[in-house]
Image: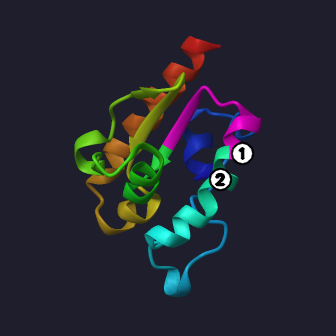
Amino acid sequence: MNMAFEGIGINREEVYIANIVKCRPPNNRNPEADEAEACLDYLRNQVMLVKPKVIVLLGSVALKNILGNEYGITASRGKWIEQKGILYMPTWHPAALLRDDNKKIEFWNDLKEVKRKMQEIK
């Protein structure tokens, strides 16, 4: 992820990276609902402390746990969603890029849009 941000010209100092869960589930599987729920208060506190203007949601797990199950990554990626004064940009999880080369261009375009928005709101 750091290399992607660097490649697009976003300084690492401008980025705070957090995860839905604070420890990886067995066999690197997606977290189950109760595992995510157990960590969400910690993540909410991180967001309150950092006070981000933009949050990039990497993949379906992040999207659904942060914004709700009514969102799907395929339909939502690349589109700004604003809630409670924070702009969210859903995009593909980096693991999805390894499985499908076609998603790399969309991911790159999403990050370019994030950079544009960050410059706009400075």
Q: Are marks 1 and 2 in contact (CB under 8 Å)?
A: yes
The residue singled out by tag 1 in the image is 45
Q: Residue furthest left?
A: 75
Q: Residues within 10 Å of mark 1 (few under 14, many from 20)?
A: few
The amino acid beneath tag 2 is Asp
Q: Please give the range of residues in magenta.
A: 45-56
Mark 2 residue element: helix
Q: Quadrant of the C terminus?
A: top right
Image vertical order of residue 24 relative to residue 37, above or below? below
The residue singled out by tag 2 in the image is 41
Assess whether residue 51 is covered by the magenta stretch: yes
Image location (x, y in percent) of residue 4: 55, 47
Mark 1 residue element: helix
Quadrant position of residue 25: bottom right
Q: Residues within 10 Å of mark 2 (few under 14, many from 20)?
A: few
Q: Residue furthest bottom?
A: 27
